[in-house]
Amino acid sequence: MGDGIISVNTAGTVLLSDRVSRVSLDIYPGSSLREQFPALWSKVVETMRDRRPRFELSVQRGETSFLVTVSPVMVDDEVSGAICVFVENTDLEIMTRQLRSFRELTKELAAIIDSSSEGLWVFDGYGVVLRVNPAAERNNRVKKEVVVGLTARELIEQGYMERSPALEVLGSKGVVNMLVNEGNRKLIVTGTPVFGDEGGIIRVVVSERDITEIDKLQRELEDQEAIKGQFWHHMLEQQQAELASQTIIAKSPRMITALRQAVKVSSADSTVLIHGESGVGKGLFADLIHKNSSRSAKPIIKLNCGAIPESLIESELFGHERGAFTGAQTAKPGYLELADNGILFLDEIAELPLASQVKLLRFLEDGRVTRLGGTTGRTVDVRIIAATHRDLEKMVVEKTFRLDLYYRLNVIPLYIPALRERQECLLPLIRHYIDYFSQKVGKQKRLARAALDALLAYSYPGNVRELMNLCERLVVMSETEVIDLQDLPKQLFGSLEEKPLSQSEQTLPVWPGDMTLEQILESVERSLLSDAMKEHGNQYRIAEALGINQSTVARKLKKYGVS
């Protein structure tokens, strides 16, 4: 602006002043308007008291006369200070328009600061508190009306805080990070200096992040060293969808893709065939589809085709009339009727006998159910979701599963990766189930680093079900709060120690005597990268497995011609 403009707080301390105010009026941030311009300050006090702007006030500085307009600054119906605009031969209408714009900007910035979830303190270049937002009031159990105007040292002396990052910033003239315990809360506090045109500190901004909840999830900060000069490293991202008191945790791209596909097919009414090994959570995906479908208000009925004797499966699926067979004393509806207007989940569909496959195929074609021993049928509206861990295409070739039923079921295939195919999910799954079973038994348990490494290295042939059972066992059976290596079952690490080495494993490779050390190292490196590519399939997984950067992997693969 071509005019001079300053803002002052209710104590008369100048908060902001532009270049014209500093050069023409010698008004700088931190100076006292009360002392420099007593007559003007009295008008400012009246303006803040009755909240009415005052115009055409005059201030003389040397031989130059300025016309002054004073306006109150309102934040949430409270006066927080005033704006003074000094005009030298400037049209009053232009000045008013500029003032209104500045007031709107000031209010907008104040609203942004007050709405921040992080606590914010603003100090001037002398360590005086100028502003405190509501989050900082909650974190420190203070009121801004009490602390604004106090110095950082007075805050310590009066017991509002034990350490002041503002004092350390003013001393070091650099960014300061510290961990603060405030009652039962833990805060990461960062003090940042703001430098003026002359190079001195004109403001210190202190931000507070409440990490109490993060600390409960992590159970410990990674280390004090991890927050020196920065906040914690990014906390492990978790994607959780709550499904009927169950939890699906997905972090790997393949699992996230499977979840997205499940949510996408929920909106349709097509038949879904879920593929995946035992224990990967096919039932949870069925729940997810049901929860997000238009049939969520109706029941999802689940039938494990492999858990019912072959002689009873047809009766369970289609129902029976009284006297249909020995022991049928009353009529009973089948699972298809119970699932009317809802979803029927047929788990282990590969175990369905051929005779029942024929009747299920007929139902999928016309939607009619005829009970065992009945002569009339009824139409039901049921969406079928099937699941299997077996290769149905191979069973079709072997004629143990009907081809026409396979095509009817496989309208929308959905593959759930095994746990070994989504290593990124392993750590959050382990932590989730350790916490879950700790809450169930009422004893907080946590894993030692060595035990966690052993759990991360295990292949989990039983997938998530095996991991869940293992975590429950560890929580229940461990004697101490910390679960260590001695608490783990032998199959996780003992078998590796007891397994005898083969003759080839006991014999070290022998290189020709004329090879140099560099050539031998390159040979080993080439062999290692080749094996890693076969096992992991892409550069990012190789980098993670070998503990190096992806760019390093790419460079070495190119160097050795490994594709």
Image: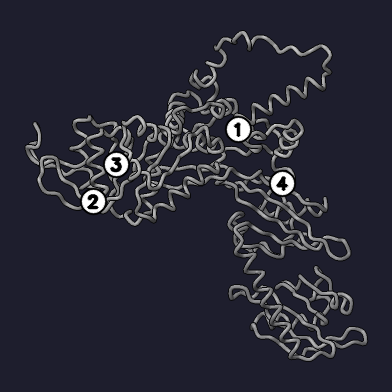
Element under label 1?
Answer: helix
Residue at (31% x, 31% y) in the render: 400
Q: CA gap, disc 1 to disc 3? A: 36 Å
| C-alpha separation, residue under disc 4 versus residue under disc 1 | 33 Å
Mark nearer the N terminus (1 vs 3) = 3
**In the image shown, does 373 or 436 lie closer to the viewer?**
373
Check contact, mark 4 vs mark 2: CB within 8 A.
no
User: Could you tell me the amino acid type at mark 3?
Assistant: Lys
Amino acid found under the numbered disc labelled 4: Gln
Q: Quadrant of residue 59?
A: bottom right
Render colour scheme: one colour
Q: What secondary structure is marked by label 4?
A: loop
Which residue lies at the image location 70% right of the left edge and 31% below the top edge?
562
Distance CA(mark 2)–CA(mark 1)? 46 Å
Question: Are there few (<14), some (14-19), or many (20+) residues within 10 Å of tag 2?
Answer: some
Distance Cα–Cα, label 3 vs label 4: 50 Å
